[in-house]
Amino acid sequence: MQPVLNIEDVKRVEVALTRVGVSVSELMHRAGYAAAQEVMALPEAETVVVLVGTGNNGGDGWVAAETLKAKGRAVQVVTPVAPADLRGDLARMVAQGAAANGVPIIVGPSRSELEALLDKTDVVLDCMLGTGFEGALRTPYDIWVDCLNASGARVVSVDVPSGLSAQTGAAPGACVVADMTVTMLALKPGLLADKGRDVCGSIVVAPLAEQTEQLVSEAEPVAWRAELEDYLDVLIEPSNAVDKFTRGSVLVVGGSTRFPGAPVLAAKAAARAGAGYVTLAVPESIAALVQTQVLEIPVVGLPCDAEGTLSEDAAERVARMAEANTATLVGPGLRVTGGTAAVVTALINSNAPLVVDADGLNSLARSTTGQLDEYPELLRRSQPLVLTPHRRELGRLVGLENAPESLVEQIEAARRIIWANGGSELAIVAKGSATGCVGVGEAILPKPGPAALATAGSGDVLGGIIASLIAQKGGSVDDLPLLCALACEFHGYAASIAAERYGSRGVMARDIIEVLGLAADTIEEHCYYPGAAMPAGV
């Protein structure tokens, strides 16, 4: 797994490196050299323009420019001020050194001059603003970014695309759209979520020192980005010696007159993800309708009220059914009522592995008045419990006035609940443009799925996949966050296959379900044989 560090923790690692003998100057020279190496590896990189700022990120650019010139590349540096006018001692020193060694410099060009320069260069190295940047770009960088994005040059950003917050992934104004980002020491959360997913391109981590791995680990990463081979410990071992009972059974509880389709999607997803037996429990008022949509899945009608939602009388029966199955999913399409609250409470109090989604979560938020982290005993149990909130649902669970706006805020909100509970049986799948699977000891970031997942019902599909994988593990999971992350990988890759078939805007939740088996097989194969390239689609 790759560690992901908050920006403040990156700074602490830099300080720690100086204490073991790697000076700030040496770090800058290594960073500049690492960036230059990536540029030189590009086949078209004969002419290079380096856009530098006035801080240490600009210093990296001056070092890279001098390295590129020494390697025979035609390089020019564009700077807002002359080297002698740089305020930082280190940046001024390396800039003056590059100038003394004959690196061509252009100071404060006009828009037309910069446009003409960028139009005839192969690669642009973006070293304008670094990881300390927040807010919107100011002149001249806003103009430079506009010119750069309009050019046809290949763009390599150093540490972070200028204009993007490396911490939050936000970019309120203009932002460099890079083909590659060479980030130093460790991944940062803003590179992996929200706007960062659109503008970073491929991401290369330059460790800069042999001590970095240990120091980064000691800095307590905010999260860990999973690689496919990391899932080997939670994969369901393939075997022909199985039947529908040994592959696990899933109970899906959901639905209402208004939302009859949500539990259908979840149940189908559980079956497509490999569960041997799936049962769907819905309000009696829609049972006949639902049964026509799931020929292979038995449907049980439960007591309901006049509005077509589950009544409190359903709670005891649902709890008994849950304990007869290997895993249960509750929530899709239920609506928030007294009956829903009774059913969710009965299931949490049962001795059954449980996934809570959608209105099951909203019911928890209402019953705890948005302070779920203040009721740790409510979620404390001996069997696995997974909550799967999107950002708005997560905000409701912990009483936030506004939903979490970034990956880091998602993880922080989830940890409020996790750490209050303190048990390894609880995991929260905090869904967003990047998803964090959070447990008491770690937060794991699966590879984010495509934009095709932004469609109604895709969350129901994910809930079904998670319940299915828990069931196939016999309800006993040693690393619950990792298993949830694997489910997210299946979900995301299935959406990629569906997007190949139907287009990025044409995918519906049922299309994701139809290719889940193909996605799971492909990912499992690449977990066992990580050297093979993942196909774009099937």
Image (spheres, rainbow, N blue to C red):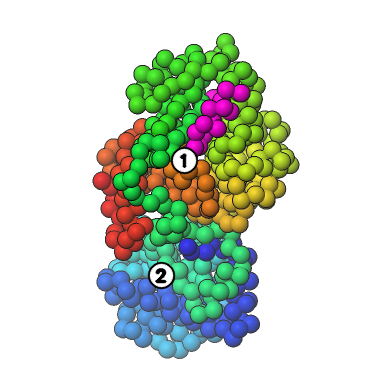
Q: Residue at the location (49% across, 37% down)?
A: 326
Residue beneath label 1, please? Answer: 471
Q: Quadrant of residue 368?
A: top right
Q: Nearer the viewer, residue 35 or 291?
A: 291
Q: Disc number at residue 97?
A: none
Stretch of the chain drawn in magenta: 316-335
User: Mark 2: few, some, or many residues within 10 Å (few <14, many ≥20)?
Assistant: many
325 in the magenta segment: yes
Q: Secondary structure at mark 2?
A: strand
CA gap between label 2 and label 1 equals 50 Å
Q: Residue at the location (34% across, 69% down)?
A: 123
Question: Is 423 left or right of 97, judged from the image as shown?
Answer: right
**Residue 407 appearing in the image:** no
Where's residue 164, x and y in %? 51, 58
User: Mark 1: few, some, or many residues within 10 Å (few <14, many ≥20)?
Assistant: many
508 in the magenta segment: no
Three-letter amino acid code at the position of disc 2: Leu
Q: Nearer the viewer, residue 45 or 273?
A: 273
Residue beneath label 2, please? Answer: 125
